[in-house]
Each structure stands twice: as structure tokens, then as C-alpha cells.
């Protein structure tokens, strides 16, 4: 009994030793407790984590594995060994360890992330993309945002090959993504490959206009849009060196304000967009829908302003020989007036 109390007191002092950087003393105490077979699931875990902290990876791995093979409570050891396997680039084993824990805690994002990055770095691209879609519910821009964030982390550690691998996955999900190309060019600049850097930067000038136009589809406030997509498209303004896309970027700014609930700011953006290019229909439609929202259908002045903007958009569609879209504007006006009359 006395020996047990002595060991308990010793175990309690180990965390303080580690916190105060007395690593050698903490390690000696843990070795003593392990020799006495005192609470092995606790002592082996503490020693493994300390060894990992001291970059003694083989010793840490051995301690975590001992718990997994001999102790009843294995979860924490699997967790630690999964992260260690990832850190030492033992990606296939990291995935196996993560899968053991995810059976009990399938929504743990830290573990999902280790599994996902292990798939990417072990070149299991198809499986990685399927898993990305599973984690982020097929939201392309959430996936891209995650991959860009991870790219920034590995570049901060000078791990350029991993950065390029992450950007390769971005390319497979969103081809010719300008921000991806810019990050790729930056990496080649870091490693001193100026020729590749210049080639990619030249490609951006060619890709950006087509990419932006193909993604700009915002002309209805009431169809569900992804705020991340709008925010991403706004980031592309850094590539508009000659101000060719001021109008659509102002429309997107208004759309973002609307999604974030800044309705008055949204209205101002759409009015500014109309001044920039009065021959395009999108800003008129979005301004009309914003005014309609602001009026609540029972403010005659705002309702009339909304109707006028729908009519202007209708005229533009007729000039562009798009009768089906002009008809849609007439339906919007009819809906606006019918809703008013019901009050």
C-alpha cells in the first residue's frame, strides 16, 4: 500500500517536471514506474508523448504500440501513434490507426484531416478526393479553402513538394484555378526555378479572364449560392490588372453583402455596378430583388423602384434576343404586384 502511494505521488509530479522542462528527470521517473509495472496504460503513454516531444520517434512508437498490443484502454495510444505515423511519413499505417478510432468517433476532424492528408501524400488521389467530398459535403470551395490553408502551412515549413502535391489536388477539383497557379509559381520562385515561375505566371494572364467569366453566374438573389464561392471570386480581383472586370466584381461585392445581411450596402453596390455598365442585366435584377426585400412588398416607392429595374432588365434581354429571360422578368413583376394586392 505504501509503495502504491509512493508511485502515485511520483506520477503526479511528472507533468510538472515536463511543464518546467525537466525532461531528463521526468523520463527517469517514468522508467522507474514502468519497471515496477505501475499503471502501464498511463505511464507508457506519458513516456511515449515525452519521447515524441524530444524527437525520439522510435521510442515513442514503441511505447504507443506496447499499449495497443497489451492494454485494454488503447484509444489514446492509437490517437498518438496515428499522428506520429503521419509526422514520420508512415502514411499507410497512419490511415490504419485513424480508421481504428474513427469507428468510435467518426466526426473528429483532426483525425479525418490526418487520414485525408495521408491519402494525398501517399498519392491516393482518387480516394483522397472522394474523402474530401465526404468531409466537406461536396462543397468545392470549402475543399479548396482547406487545401490552400494546408498549402500555406507546409510552405511555412519549407516543404515545397507537399505544397505542390496539395495544389495538384486543387487542379483536379477546379481546373486552371488562378490562385492555385499563383501559389504554384510562388513555390517555384522559392526553389529558384525562375523559368517555371515565369511560365506559370504567363499562364495566369491567359487563364484568368476565361476562368472568371465561366464562374460568374450571379443574377438571381433567391437561388442558393455559396458564400465561399462568392468570396473566392472576389479574391480574383488581384488578377484584374487592367480593371476589365470592375462591373462583375462590384456585383459580387453586392451579392456578398446580401448573403452576410448587409442589405443597404448590397443596394449601394448594385447601384454602383449599374453606373459602371448600364447595358448589363445582372445588377438591375439584383437591385430589383434587393429593393423588393427592403420594401417587404408594402412600401410603394421601393416596390415601384424594384418594378422599374425589372423592366430595364426585360428590355436588355429583348435586345439580346433572349425572350425566355425577358418573360422571366415579366413573371417577377407579376409576382411583385400580386403579392402587394394580397395585403
Image: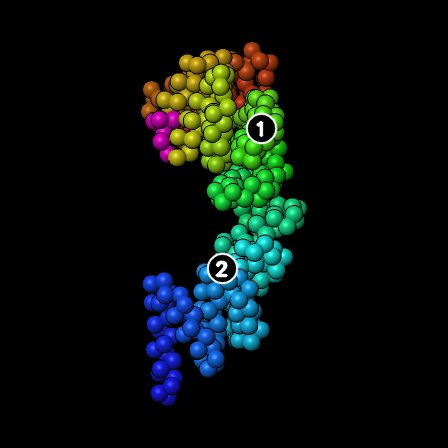
Quadrant placement of the N terminus: bottom left
Residue 189 belongs to the span the image colors magenta:
no
Whether tag 1 and tag 2 are in contact, CB under 8 A, the answer is no
Residue 21, quarter of the rendered image? bottom left
Q: Does 16 sit above or below residue 94? A: below
Q: Nearer the viewer, residue 163 or 235?
A: 163
Q: Nearer the viewer, residue 19 or 169?
A: 19
The magenta span reads 261-266
* Residue 308, position as x, y percentages in the image: 42, 16
Numbered circles on residues, count: 2
Residue lying furthest front? 24
- Regarding residue 150, the answer to whether it shows in the image is no
Q: Does 89 sit above or below residue 65? A: above
According to the image, label 1 marks what residue?
194
Left or right of 310, for residue 131: right
According to the image, label 2 marks what residue?
55
Q: Does 95 sit above or below residue 306? A: below
Identified at 62% across, 33% down, the residue is 175
Residue 325 badge: none
Identified at 61% across, 51% down, the residue is 119
Amino acid at each position: 500500500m505504501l509503495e502504491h502511494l509512493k508511485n502515485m505521488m511520483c506520477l503526479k509530479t511528472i507533468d510538472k517536471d515536463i511543464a518546467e522542462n525537466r525532461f531528463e528527470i521526468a523520463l527517469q521517473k517514468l522508467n522507474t514506474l514502468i519497471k515496477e509495472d505501475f499503471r502501464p496504460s498511463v505511464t507508457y503513454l506519458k513516456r511515449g508523448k515525452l519521447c515524441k516531444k524530444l524527437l525520439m520517434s522510435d521510442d515513442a512508437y514503441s511505447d504507443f504500440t506496447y499499449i495497443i498490443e497489451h492494454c485494454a484502454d488503447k484509444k489514446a495510444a492509437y490517437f498518438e501513434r496515428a499522428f506520429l505515423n503521419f509526422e514520420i511519413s508512415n502514411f499507410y499505417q497512419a490511415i490504419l490507426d485513424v480508421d481504428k478510432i474513427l469507428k468510435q468517433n467518426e466526426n473528429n476532424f483532426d483525425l479525418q484531416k490526418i487520414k485525408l492528408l495521408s491519402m494525398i501524400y501517399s498519392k491516393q488521389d482518387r480516394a483522397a478526393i472522394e474523402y474530401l467530398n465526404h468531409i466537406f459535403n461536396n462543397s468545392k470551395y470549402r475543399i479548396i479553402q482547406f487545401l490552400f490553408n494546408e498549402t500555406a502551412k507546409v510552405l511555412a515549413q519549407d516543404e515545397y513538394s507537399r505544397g505542390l502535391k496539395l495544389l495538384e489536388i486543387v487542379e483536379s477539383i477546379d481546373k486552371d484555378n488562378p490562385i492555385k497557379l499563383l501559389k504554384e509559381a510562388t513555390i517555384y520562385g522559392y526553389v529558384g526555378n525562375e523559368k517555371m515561375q515565369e511560365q506559370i505566371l504567363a499562364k495566369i494572364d491567359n487563364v484568368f479572364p476565361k476562368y472568371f467569366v465561366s464562374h460568374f453566374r450571379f443574377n438571381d438573389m433567391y437561388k442558393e449560392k455559396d458564400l465561399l464561392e462568392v468570396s473566392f471570386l472576389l479574391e480574383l480581383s488581384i488578377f484584374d490588372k487592367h480593371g476589365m472586370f470592375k462591373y462583375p466584381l462590384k456585383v459580387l461585392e453586392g451579392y456578398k453583402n446580401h448573403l452576410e445581411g448587409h442589405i443597404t450596402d448590397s443596394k449601394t453596390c448594385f447601384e454602383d455596378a449599374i453606373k459602371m455598365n448600364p447595358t448589363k442585366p445582372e445588377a438591375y435584377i439584383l437591385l430589383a430583388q434587393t429593393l423588393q426585400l427592403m420594401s417587404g412588398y408594402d412600401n410603394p416607392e421601393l416596390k415601384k423602384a424594384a418594378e422599374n429595374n425589372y423592366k430595364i432588365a426585360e428590355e436588355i434581354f429583348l435586345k439580346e434576343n433572349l425572350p425566355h429571360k425577358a418573360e422571366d422578368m415579366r413573371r417577377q413583376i407579376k409576382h411583385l404586384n400580386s403579392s402587394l394586392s394580397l395585403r
